[in-house]
Amino acid sequence: MGRTGTNCRDRWRYIKPNKSTRQTGPWTKEETRLLIDSIYKLRKKADIQPYKVVYGAKISVSWEQIASLVQTRNAAQCRGKWNGFNTKHDNDIELAAQWTRSMDLLLIRAIKNAYLTHNARIPWKKVVAELSSSNVAANCHTARERWDHLKRSVLGYKTMKPVDVADFLETKLATS
């Protein structure tokens, strides 16, 4: 069969005991909303700031606890759904916090700091780590999407280095 001992254990632990209530296949909108709400609720209960996090971000609470709140999915399914969210397919669900001017400035400064140390491509993991230390909930995908949105407002951005675009945007946001 090609299953490891871990696969068999997980199958028994997650699937057999919950056979009557577990779901398989595509997630419903209600289940997805319940997953997001459960993560928020448990983070708030544990006082883990920020309470609302973007899809795919580290949640710092037990997937077992989340599965017990979702009820129709097991911990592995919840973790898989959370880490596999796709904004193009899950766009009807508000997952990311609205970007504010101060968050934009933090993103721009994080990009400048990360780019200056690498001097080639923007290392998004470092950018996200710096944002996290400033309590901005973002992952590589959302940070890059926001950066792409911001840089398109700069005339001639395609011929500029990222650090020059960031300098321009920082000045523009600081004075507006």
Image (cartoon, grey):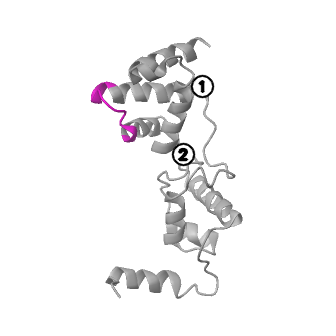
Labels 1 and 2 touching (C-beta < 8 A): no
Residue 44 vs residue 162, the one in the foreground: 162
Against 150, residue 42 (above or below) is: below
Residue 1 vs residue 42, the one in the foreground: 1
Confirm whether residue 89 shows in the render. Answer: yes
Q: Is residue 124 left or right of residue 118?
A: right
Confirm whether residue 166 shows in the render. Answer: no
Q: Which mark is residue 49?
A: 2
Q: Which span is picked out in magenta? A: 116-125
Residue 106 vs residue 85, the one in the foreground: 85
Amino acid type of the residue that numbered disc 2 sits on in the rendered structure: Gln
Q: Which mark is residue 52?
A: none
3D distance between C-alphas at marks 1 and 2: 20 Å
Against 9, residue 85 (above or below) is: above
For the C terminus, which image quadrant? top right
For the N terminus, which image quadrant? bottom left
Foreground: disc 1 or disc 2: 1
- Give coordinates of residue 152: x percent, y percent: 55, 25
Against 158, residue 146 (above or below) is: below
Report which quarter residue 50 is drawn in.
top right
Q: Is residue 149 left or right of residue 166?
A: right
Q: Which mark is residue 101?
A: 1
Q: Is residue 48 part of the magenta span, yes or no?
A: no
Against 95, residue 150 (above or below) is: above
Q: Residue at x 52, y 70 (%)?
A: 77
Q: Residue at x 63, y 69 (%)?
A: 70
Mark 2 residue crowding within 10 angstroms, few (<14) / some (14–19) / many (20+): few
Amino acid type of the residue that numbered disc 1 sits on in the rendered structure: Arg
